[in-house]
Amino acid sequence: MSLLVVGSIALDDVESPAGRVEDALGGATCYFAVAAQYFTQVRAVGVVGDDFPAEHLDFLAARGIDIAGIAREPGRSFRWGGRYHESLNDRDTLFTELGVFEAFDPTLPESYLDSEYVFLANIHPSLQQRVLEQAVRRRFVAMDTMNFWIEGTREELDHTLARVDALVINDAEAHLLTGTTNLVHAARAIRSMGPETVIIKRGEFGALLFDSQGIFAAPAFPLEEVRDPTGAGDTFAGGFMGALARAGSVDAASLRKAVIYGSAMASFCVERFSLDRLRELTRDEIESRFEAFYTLTRF
Ligand code: AMP
């Protein structure tokens, strides 16, 4: 099944207690697409500047990701810098340089218009709606957002929320969106805004899915070493949406299985910097970790 992702493509500078990288491949689209391509065919939409290394686009294409929707514009690529603290739960954003991303106006190539599964990564809610208007054959749409849009463009965000099937956000964003820190209340409030399914990510505490069938909890996989949590959320979304598209079903059982695939992919992501761990994964490793989740939670 066809899976479309729209969002940032970045060059990241990241520091954590385990080391640092500069100009590393990042951005929601890249994390999502590389995770999801282990499950299904992925179509990517984004923008890069003329400084963006060709090798990164070559890598995405070599993974079978359709990059016809990635535009190269004159100017600098989107750049983001972050520093993690000892606990790895907290990070400081050191800089955000929008570059060509500031004027990003997602246009789907003709060949993407029949996409059935759609992920709207963290971009302006009006741009998310522009994507929905073009993806006329959409069957299941999930979206992300962030504090900047929740606080600054609430009306547009409410319009987008009313049109999607699932919202995937972290606990702090759920709190900001609903005014409540109780996640059950927050999820209920979000479901009344439009999305039938709400997934709240809780970092090292795992993720909760809320839908008409109730609540499903997935732990975060206990890892001996976490080097770089950057992109874990987008990688989770990539595994989740990829698994759904592969299943060709969005029933309650498929959604729950997909949450475990999302959690498995996110657990790989944080083991190394940037997309380094996601690059070298095998399908066997993914299935083994999926099974490990089963063992971890069965009693
Ligand atoms: P996460 O760790 O899930 O927040 O994702 C981090 C990734 O999102 C990094 O690769 C950044 O390049 C990218 N990113 C950071 N800030 C933004 C933003 N304001 N808009 C879009 N993407 C961003």
Image (cartoon, rainbow, N blue to C red):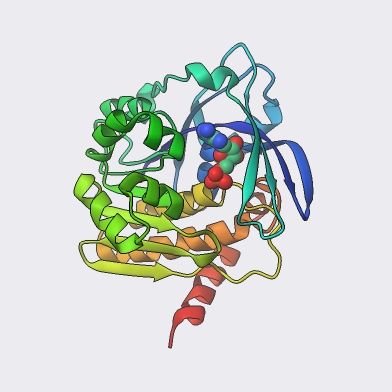
Q: Is residue 133 above or below residue 75?
A: below
Position of 139 with respect to 18 (left or right) is: left
Q: Is residue 49 above or below residue 163?
A: above
Q: Position of residue 19 (x, y in %)?
A: 80, 50
Position of 156 with respect to 146 (left or right) is: left
For the residue pair 190 and 220, the one nearer the viewer reads as 190
Displayed quadrant of residue 139: top left
Position of 277 with respect to 221 (left or right) is: right
Quarter the C terminus occupies: bottom left
Q: Position of residue 269 (x, y in %)?
A: 61, 54
Ligand 1 lies in quarter: top right
How many numbered badges does the structure rendering display? Answer: 0
Question: In the orientation shown, which residue stands out farthest toward the top?
Answer: 74
Q: Residue at x 67, y 45 (%)?
A: 274
- Residue 203 visible in the picture: yes
Q: Residue at x 51, y 66 (%)?
A: 205
Q: Is residue 143 above or below residue 49?
A: below
Q: Is residue 220 above or below residue 16?
A: below
Displayed quadrant of residue 145: top left
Displayed quadrant of residue 122: top left
Q: Residue at x 48, y 16 (%)?
A: 103
Question: In the orientation shown, which residue stands out farthest toward the right?
Answer: 19
- Residue 255 visible in the picture: no
Q: Residue at x 58, y 35 (%)?
A: 61
Q: Position of residue 81 (x, y in %)?
A: 67, 36
For the residue pair 289 and 149, the one nearer the viewer reads as 149
Q: Position of residue 257 (x, y in %)?
A: 38, 65
For the residue pair 60 and 121, the one nearer the viewer reads as 121
